[in-house]
Amino acid sequence: MKLFEIIPILEELAPLAYAEDFDNVGLLVGDQKETIHGILVCHDALENVIEEAILKKCNLVVCFHPILFSGLKKITGKNYVERAIIKAIKNDIAIYAIHTALDNHQQGVNKIFCDALGLKNTKILIPKENYIKKLITYTVPENATTLRNALFEAGAGKIGNYEDCSFNSQGIGTYLGNENSNPEIGTRFEFVENTEIKIEVTFEKHLELKILKALFKNHIYEEVAYEIYALTNKHQNIGLGMIGEFENATNETDFLSLVKEKMQCGGIRHSIFTNKKIKKVAVLGGSGSFAIKAALQAGADAFLTSDLKYHQFYEAEGKLLLADIGHFESERYTKNYIVDYLKEKITNFAVVLSEENTNPVQYF
């Protein structure tokens, strides 16, 4: 397969539009026209991982963390990032990063985290804001069903657990065409009053071009009247972190023992015990100190994340158990999930799980 054929498969797994603004996701290194013979999936695309890809004849490395995060002005091999990039380029190996595009996905990093712990009834902890738009358009009744179905097919009309959602109302539309017009109904210079259906649908903002293409292709009018609005609604199925519940509550010691076992932690730093049972648990893979307040507001008994600083443990306020389980550990099973997804989608060459442990934190 050509690399440009694989990229849409990766974007289906983790749409780039889901990524945070600060992130650097997608194709970082490589020519989209390159023929791919094998894919190596890893957590971090370090130099030893690139060497593993060479050994295993994989010329595409799909990594969770982007090896290129901030800008490079020189590539001289003076640090681990530059050395990895140089080795990849010299050996014609492409690098594609997923990171927060999968963090924000409903089935992504934090769902994997929850599943590993056995949490049920999961939902997004911090829903994404300013991500929903609304389309309003007008057409004749005879065209309404065809047009509406085309918009649904393009991705409009999805709200939570429901699809094909729209609001339709009937009214009277008017127009008068000039000498350059070619009206579908009526003639030039004729004032037309016609029964029309007003169709309203919402959509995720990254689908706008696709939605408009469907609108223009399936609308019968020469000039299509439409409006698009940005909504302030939160998107309940896209966002950072997740919260779920255990079937049975447990004490704090047993809870941390379970977390240590399931996430294979070298150690867990935690706040002072609250002496409450743990049933409702919030998680956020990677650095999640910014979500402590959200975990408290959601009524979590515990919040699992990583990279917490000294004073941030005070923010638990004795109301929840705050635990830093390690950055790598909190995202441990993400690469396995990516491998399983790609093996299902791509069957004509090898998709390989990296055997390199790229966790830079060691425990004594």
Image: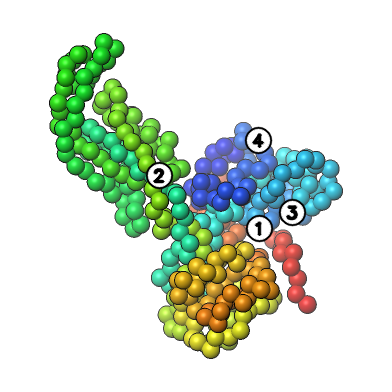
Using residue 60 as the reference point, say whether residue 107 is left or right of it: left
Which SS class for mark 3? Answer: loop
Q: Give residue 282's position: percent from left, percent from top.
A: 50, 71
Which SS class for mark 2? Answer: strand
Residue at x 74%, y 68% (from the top left corner): 361
Determine crowd level at label 3: few under 14, some 14-19, many 20+ residues with C-alpha closer than 10 A: many
- Residue topped by disc 3: 46
Mark sitting earlier along the chain (4/2): 4
How far apart, in angstroms, are the residues tagged by discs 3 and 1? 9 Å
Which SS class for mark 4? Answer: loop
- Residue topped by disc 2: 230
Q: Give residue 355's position: percent from left, percent from top.
A: 69, 61
How far apart, in angstroms, are the residues tagged by discs 4 and 2? 35 Å
Q: Quadrant of residue 134?
A: top left
Q: Is residue 30 visible?
A: yes
- For badge 2, the amino acid type reads Ala
Determine crowd level at label 2: few under 14, some 14-19, many 20+ residues with C-alpha closer than 10 A: some
- For badge 1, the amino acid type reads His
Using residue 12 as the reference point, say whether residue 309 is left or right of it: right
Q: Quadrant of residue 121?
A: bottom left
Q: Is residue 340 visible?
A: no
- Residue topped by disc 1: 43
Using residue 312 as the reference point, say whether residue 18 is left or right of it: left
Mark sitting earlier along the chain (3/4): 4
Residue at x 48%, y 75% (from the top left corner): 300
Cβ–Cβ below 8 Å for labels 3 and 1? Answer: no
Above-or-below relation of 188 to 65:
above
Q: Quadrant of the N terminus?
A: top right
Q: Give residue 40's position: percent from left, percent from top.
A: 65, 52
